[in-house]
Amino acid sequence: MTTSTKEANSESILSDIAINAELADYSPVKGCMVIRPHGYAIWESIQKILDKMIKDTGHENAYFPLLVPESFLQKEAEHVEGFAPECAVVTQAGGKELNEKYVIRPTSETIINHMFSKWVGSYRDLPLKLNQWANVMRWEMRTRLFLRTSEFLWQEGHTCHSTHEEAKKEVMQMINVYKDLLENYLAVPVHIGEKTDSEKFAGALDTFTIEALMRDGKALQAGTSHDLGQNFAKAFDTTFTSQENKLDYVWQTSWGVSTRLIGAIIMGHNDEVGLILPPKIAPFQVVIIPILKKNMDNSLVLEKSKELKSQLEQLDIRVKLDDRTQISQGHKFNEYEQKGIPIRLVVGARDLENNQVEIHRRDIQSKEKGVPLENLDNRIKDLLDEIQNSLLNRALEFRNKRTKTVTSIEELDSVLNCEGGFARAMWNGDTELEKILKEKFSASIRCLPLEKELSEDTPCLFSGTISSENKEIMIAKAY
């Protein structure tokens, strides 16, 4: 299979699952998408979990305007250069030309810094730790549902600190919060690593990333955390008087994840049927489908189904009872398989005569008949934990299988252009390698991983030399 065919298949898998699972649909606005209720409910699940994590680490939510004065972006040179090609600009309002153009926010560092410069004056005002749930727009040339759209939803954290050391601790704290979210809730294993200078956030000193591997062999940057140093503080004159009565610029961070996480779920957990949802973020974890027959008394089946729903909800299990009569049972089964619902309970009159139900498990496409009603609620709770762990282990096994050590460009070619996956290697820092990766392989250095696996006697894949100065890197094709 050629590389272009692989990419086409990958894009088809993503769009087919997103459409068939009723997560999203294409919008009449170029490059944008409509997030449907099932897709938005997944985002709300993620948002609820992450919002608590953010608040538990001492941050507060705020909201800043969608429109950013164009002059604000001009104040930080690297920032404007990095985002200028992606900016959508408002030039008219109220039927008149604007004296100053407004940019629809691609990110909010500049306008937030304008406010920080008003709010921070003393060390007593620090640390200042805010988070914003919002939408942003980046005018993408080639878009994919959830993974890369012109408009998307996200959260962006912004903090000010009195020392660089404190800011760096914040950067690492939040990238580890993201790792926790991905691995323990989305069941997507990630590597934490540092971006190269060419890949870091525009205007940052350093960028740390979590990199995941999708089932098509491509890497996904699932979240980032940036050490902004004093760059934005100097551009916006955000200063504070220290305890020593000295005037200094604040040290800043920013960090964020987006609805791209739904793309990570789609491409990280799927099979030939479609989407598989990890139970912890599924809008409802169990769907109960009573077998309703025409021209018959279905009251007993419905009553027992409602009773089961109540029992499961008492264990904090999210449950949906589908008692629609205008839809066939087969149609319902297919709908919930496509939507990736972890467990399906089928309740029929004949089974109830024997105090039994039928359990369908989505992740392994299993069906178990004759399951006793006794202690069913606890069994379902345990099964949900089993499914969550199984999905994470499956993803870990896949990532390990698709991660290879390479010591030459030739070995790299066999990894990237055959199965795909992560290539671990040593690198002497020559940026010429990044050009070769982009031009020859349409790949990039995803990160310099914090967890090292290679020994110092592994040669640089670019120069072939062994040196204590070599750095360990992870290379992959990415979205």
Image: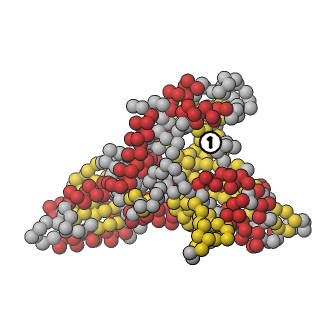
Residue 101 against residue 422 in the figure, above or below: below
Which of the 4 quarters of the picture holds residue 238?
bottom right
Q: Residue furthest front?
A: 96
Residue 426 x %, y %: 65, 31
The residue pinned by badge 1 equals 447
Left or right: where 164 falls relative to 298 = right
Label total for image:
1
Residue 272 against residue 404 in the figure, above or below: below
Mark 1 is surrounded, within 10 Å at the Cα level, by few (under 14), some (14 to 19) or many (20 or more) other residues, namely many
Quadrant into which the N terminus falls: top left
Left or right: where 349 falls relative to 270 = left
Residue 174 against residue 320 in the figure, above or below: above
Q: Nearer the viewer, residue 316 or 86?
A: 86
Q: Is residue 209 visible?
A: yes
Amino acid found under the numbered disc labelled 1 = Cys
Residue depicted at 25% across the width and 63% down the height:
289
